[in-house]
């Protein structure tokens, strides 16, 4: 669906004759060009993974974090323009702590997703602001169980079992659909996410990448945190092994 | 003599009060007396001090009548908005937290002690005390108001974990009637509200149905009884 809306695409406050706002669609393209981000909801929690494309060999591994904790019980992974993402993460953290100081309990993940979505949407309403060039996957675990939400630059937010954004999202979605998520534990989910990300990474087109993963599940005491190092290494090893198997065919 | 009565009549309405909130196995029971006093004058002998905040959370009010009404009105409004936004009933904890934010942030102007009680599907029956000053304390039972001073020892002895609904309500009624017997600023009827997973039940115990304690007298021949029972009026005229 790539058409150029000549004349109707200069401002986010202009509709085209066929009812589209092109600036928002262009913002979505910024997301599509970034490294893949995946989230899945397993039976006991949520796992998120990011294919961090490394721009320069001189970057320290582990820097440029793409997954952030926004509250004790939830985290968000950002795809697209990193600086825009930082802004959204800061706002989300502030919404979460503010809710807790007024209502005395942790913000329900559904409410948090709605607040992120309405903040992103806000920036599509005024001509002096540009839309955020970020797609967000928000995973959290509250009283109503583990939940996964995705927020697009247009400001829509839906709840998902599995979601993917960025370059390899089509391939990733196909792989996610093959998984039986309702039977997977987060431990198994971490391995699967690693396999998917390694599998969709395009050696030819893209440079090196670093895998960053986080989870929030019963095993992590319902706290959002980085996947423990040994499990991460185990996942990476399994993913590499699976790749070799495929190559061997 | 006239001067002091005049002053008292213009004094702000205060609810001397005895208020109680008790958890039991499956919900909570809230209880209160019904006397609102302006000085020594009883402005309302049948007031309802247990106010509704949401379908599942109620509030016992003590101290200044005006202050406690205003706080409960504000919190009811915000809780209503919160429920709409959330899409399901607010928890007792959230209601209690909103009450204490008001009480704490306006502590210089308010004089009201509150007991919040309710039931929600996550935590079950819960009681929160928010006394003067705006502390919030979650307790298995809470007492408040001027009449509560006479009940501390009573509850220390009589309170039990895991009571049934009937035991809890009987405990509350007994306690309020004991406080009414000793506290001049508490009196009238005893109202109770029981909240559990099935809903809310309001009960009313008229003053003359309450047990008499130690040295209290039975009501004697009352002119009112004579007047109301016979149709033709009093046989005797008292000159």
Image (cartoon, coloured by chain):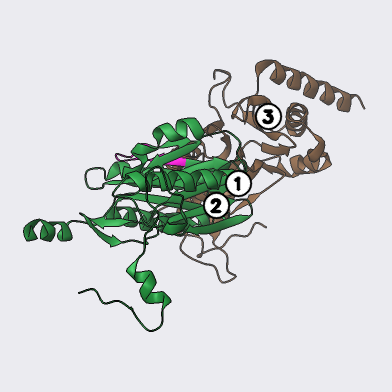
Chain colours: A brown, B green
Rendered residue at 51%/43% (across/down) = B171
Determine whether the residue tagged by mark 1 lies in a helix, strand or loop.
Answer: helix
Q: Are marks 3 and 2 in contact (CB under 8 Å)?
A: no
Horizontal placement of B110 versus B156: left or right? Answer: left
Separation of marks 1 and 2 at Cα, in angstroms: 8 Å
The residue under label 2 is: B194
Instruction: Residue B239: name its quadrant.
Output: bottom left
Return the x and y of residue A167 as percentages of the image width and height: 67, 40
Choose between A27 and A107: the one closer to the eye: A107
> Is-magenta flag for residue B91?
no
**Quarter of the picture holding the C terminus of chain A:** top right
Separation of marks 1 and 3 at Cα, in angstroms: 35 Å
Q: Which residue extends farthest right?
A: A249
Dot 3: few (<14), some (14–19), or many (≥20) neighbours within 10 Å?
some
Q: Are marks 3 and 2 on the same chain?
A: no
Horizontal placement of A126 versus B9: left or right? Answer: right
Choose between B216 and A120: the one closer to the eye: B216
The residue under label 1 is: B165
> Is-magenta flag for residue B131?
yes
Rendered residue at 69%/43% (across/down) = A163
Dot 1: few (<14), some (14–19), or many (≥20) neighbours within 10 Å?
some
Determine whether the residue tagged by mark 3 lies in a helix, strand or loop.
Answer: helix
Return the x and y of residue A86 as percentages of the image width and height: 47, 36
């Amino acid at each position: 669906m790539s058409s150029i809306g000549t004349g109707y695409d200069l401002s986010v406050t202009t509709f085209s004759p066929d009812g589209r706002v092109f600036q928002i669609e262009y913002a979505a393209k910024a997301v599509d060009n970034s490294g893949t981000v995946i989230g899945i909801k397993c039976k006991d929690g949520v796992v998120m993974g990011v294919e961090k494309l490394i721009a320069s060999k001189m970057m320290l591994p582990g820097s440029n974090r793409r997954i952030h904790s926004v509250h004790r019980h939830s985290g968000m992974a950002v795809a697209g323009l990193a600086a825009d993402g930082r802004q959204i993460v800061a706002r989300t953290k502030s919404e979460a702590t503010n809710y807790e100081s007024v209502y005395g309990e942790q913000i329900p993940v559904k409410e948090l997703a709605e607040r992120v979505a309405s903040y992103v949407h806000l920036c599509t309403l005024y001509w002096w602001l540009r839309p955020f060039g970020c797609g967000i996957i928000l995973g959290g675990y509250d009283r109503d169980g583990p939940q996964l939400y995705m927020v697009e630059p247009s400001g829509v937010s839906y709840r998902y079992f599995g979601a993917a954004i960025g370059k390899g999202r089509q391939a990733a979605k196909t792989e996610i659909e093959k998984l039986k998520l309702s039977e997977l534990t987060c431990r198994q989910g971490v391995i699967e996410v690693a396999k998917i990300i390694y599998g969709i990474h395009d050696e030819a087109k893209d440079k090196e990448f670093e895998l960053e993963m986080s989870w929030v599940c019963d095993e992590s005491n319902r706290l959002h945190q980085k996947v423990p190092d040994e499990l991460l290494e185990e996942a990476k090893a399994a993913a590499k092994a699976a790749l070799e198997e495929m190559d061997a065919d | 003599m006239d001067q002091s009565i005049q002053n008292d009549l213009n004094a702000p309405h205060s609810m001397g009060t005895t208020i109680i909130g008790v958890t039991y196995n499956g919900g909570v029971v809230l209880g209160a007396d019904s006397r609102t006093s302006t000085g020594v004058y009883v402005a309302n002998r049948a007031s309802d001090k247990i106010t509704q905040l949401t379908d599942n959370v109620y509030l016992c009010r003590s101290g200044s009548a005006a202050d406690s009404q205003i706080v409960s009105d504000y919190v009811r409004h915000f809780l209503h908005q919160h429920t709409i936004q959330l899409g399901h009933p607010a928890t007792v904890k959230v209601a209690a937290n909103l009450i204490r934010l008001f009480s704490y942030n306006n502590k210089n102007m308010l004089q009201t002690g509150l007991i919040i009680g309710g039931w929600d599907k996550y935590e079950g029956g819960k009681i929160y005390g928010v006394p003067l000053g705006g502390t919030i304390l979650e307790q298995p039972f809470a007492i408040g108001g001027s009449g509560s001073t006479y009940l501390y020892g009573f509850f220390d002895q009589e309170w039990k974990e895991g009571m049934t609904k009937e035991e809890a309500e009987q405990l509350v009624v007994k306690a309020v009637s004991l406080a009414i017997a000793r506290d001049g600023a508490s009196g009238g009827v005893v109202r109770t509200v029981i909240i559990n997973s099935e809903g809310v039940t309001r009960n009313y115990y008229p003053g003359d149905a309450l047990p008499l304690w130690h040295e209290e007298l039975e009501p004697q021949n009352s002119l009112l009884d004579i007047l109301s029972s016979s149709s033709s009026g009093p046989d005797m005229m008292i000159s």
